[in-house]
Amino acid sequence: MARMKKRIAILGSTGSVGSQTLDVLRQFPDDFEIVGLSAGVNVDRLKKQVDEFRPRYFSCIDESISELGPAQRISSVDLATHPDVDFVMHATAGVDGLPTAAAALEAGKSVGLSNKESIVMAGAQLKTIAKENGGTILPIDSEPSALWQCVIGEKSRPKRFIITASGGAFRDKSTDEFSRVTPEEALNHPTWSMGRKITVDSATLMNKAFEVIETASLFDASFDEIDVVVHRQSIVHSLVEMDDGSIKALLSHPDMRHPIQFALFFPQRRFNPDLPEFDLLTMGDLTFEAMDRTKYPCFDVAMKYSSIGGTYNAVLAGADEAAVDLFLSRKIRFNDIAHEIESTVKSHEVVLDFTIENAIEAAKWAYETTLARHPNGG
């Protein structure tokens, strides 16, 4: 009897995580069927993907594209909720990913979620939607995925969650140098290959603040139970400490295909000849150090307002996205990013008891408010 293929939709298929998802799927043609691909503006890459994988459906922002080979155009929400889709790889970046994540979970889908902004903005609401409709959230972010893998099989709850951070592109620079760094330098991550926005967030450590928020939401932890340590090699992705003092850690090469494949096959594990094997004897030293918080004001801004909660989290996500856009377009300096975010958050009237729609509106307001301060440049 032939094995049933898991039917996949990939949102953000032309981006970093989406492309790496396709790399994994190439190795397992008998296990998965790609039902649909969704992309933003990179139509040329999307066309190549459609030609190779022959999905039935596609979605993209460019409204002039009515068809791509055999694929029929539908909206990204229709793709994420399509009855023929079993698993949605949600690989889009930014605050616009929340509505699609909510729709997929409401449709009872298993959602591999690399869009951390969705959890940051409305984690509790997404978990409720999933529980009420039979959906499942499977974290794709390297650190939350590592925590998830560490707690599987444990009957006792960890007393401490430890998230590692590479320190980003400027971990060895002084704060005096931050006003002179360029977007090109910020995008030169020392260990990971990621998309532009998350790479800048790694340099500011806003991505680590978001992972703390994500961890608190996914694992019902308080901020006091979550620590961040700098681990330059990006080999140990996260750790959990149990009540008896033992610590479990997940180690692998810094390659997003590891957490992607784990989520795709969960609860099974499969050999992938394309993934690098791990050799303890050649990996070198593993080091851990305290985070120098004076270098990462974005982290402190995020923790300050996220501890209050409500729509502050959505505003943090929207303001950060705008501030990163301003930096990449050279309208502000790197060391202005934290100030831009906090200026927007300070002017927000927080709603503590909020809906997903409130979160979407707050993030949109924050993005537009931040950009509006620089209509003609920095």
Image (cartoon, rainbow, N blue to C red):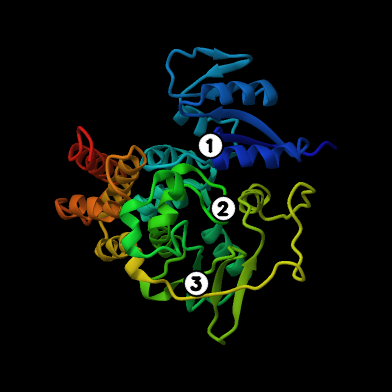
- In the image, residue 241 lies at what x, y percent? 54, 78
Whether residue 28 is situated above or below residue 262 in the rendered picture: above
Which residue type carries mark 2? Trp
Whether residue 304 is situated above or below residue 371 in the rendered picture: below
Whether residue 321 is situated above or below residue 191 in the rendered picture: above
Of residues 232 and 132, the one nearer the viewer is 232
Tell me, for residue 15, which label it has, or none. Answer: 1
Of residues 79 and 65, the one nearer the viewer is 65
Tell me, for residue 162, which label it has, or none. Answer: 3
Left or right: where does residue 101 sit relative to residue 2? left
| Image-quadrant location for residue 22 | top right
Left or right: where does residue 286 sit relative to residue 127? right
How far apart are the alpha carbons under marks 2 and 3? Answer: 19 Å
Image quadrant holding the C terminus, namely top left
Which residue is identified by label 2?
Answer: 192
Give the label, 1 or 2, closer to the camera.
2
Q: Mark 3 or mark 2, which is nearer the start of the sequence?
A: 3
- In the image, residue 20 lies at what x, y percent? 62, 41
Give the label, 3 or 1, closer to the camera.
1
Secondary structure state at the residue bearing disc 2: loop
